[in-house]
Image (tube, grey):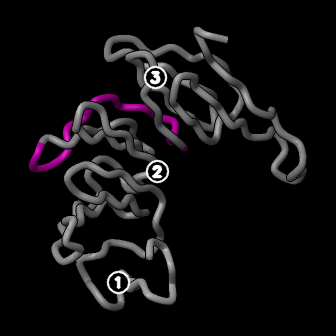
Amino acid sequence: TDLNPNDDEIFHFSQSTNPQILSDNILSFAVTDYFWIGTKLGIIRLNRDLATLTSYRRPFGDSVQAMVVINDTLFIATEAGIGKFNGVGFDTVLNLRSPVQDLAFYNGNFYLATNKGLIRYDRQTIDTIWSEPTQTLLADSILVCGMGGANPAKADWGYGMRIISDTI
C-alpha cells in the first residue's frame, strides 16, 4: 500500500553511502523527468529508477535554496540569484546580491523571497514589491508569501502572511 512503512521500502541517501551526494543538508526538491535535490553545496539529479545520480557542485552559487519547474525547464535559486538548467549545466538567469530564500513563478514573473524583501523579476526588470523579510512562497491561482520577522529573538513576532492575487 502507498506510504505504509510496514510494507514499503525506504531508501536512505547520504554522503556516507554514496560519495556523489554533495551534502546531507537538503534544502529543496523539484520533479521533472528526474528528481532534483537542492543541497548546501549544489544540486543532485536522481533518475526515476533511484539508481543513477548526477551531482552539480556549486552550479550557480552554493546553496540551492529553492527550485521551480516552468514548461519542463528547471530553475534554481541560490545566494547568487536564479540559474536555469540547459540540459548539461546551469546558465545564469539573474545575478542577485541578496540570498534567495524561496522562488516562485506566478503570472509570468519570477518572485524571489529574500531577507531584504519580495522581488519580482519579469526577465527584463527587477522590482522590489516590499522591503520586509520574506521567507517562503506558494504560487497557485494566488501568490502566498510567508513573512519573516525583524527581531529574531522574538519567535512569535513577524510580518505575517501576505497574498498577491488578481482574483480576490
Q: Nearer the viewer, residue 1 or 26?
A: 1
Instruction: Assess disc 2: are there few (<14), some (14-19) or many (≥20) residues with their C-alpha within 10 Å of its C-alpha.
Output: many
Whole-angstrom CA distance, mark 1 to mark 3, is 35 Å
Q: Which residue is the site of mark 1?
A: 15
Disc 3 residue crowd, few under 14, some 14–19, many 20+, Cα 10 Å? some
Disc 1 to disc 2, C-alpha distance: 19 Å
Q: Which element is circle 1 on?
A: loop
Residue visible at 36% across and 81% down in the picture: 13
Magenta stretch, residue numbers: 87-101
Q: Position of residue 75 (x, y in %)?
A: 31, 39
Using residue 118 as the reference point, say whether residue 82 is left or right of it: left
Q: Which residue is mark 3?
A: 106
Mark before the other along the chain sequence, 1 or 3: 1
Give the labeled residue for mark 2.
65
Q: Secondary structure at mark 3?
A: strand
The quarter of the picture where the N terminus appears is bottom left
Q: Is residue 134 left or right of residue 138?
A: right
Who comes first in sequence, dot 3 or dot 2? 2
In which quarter of the view is residue 90 placed?
top left
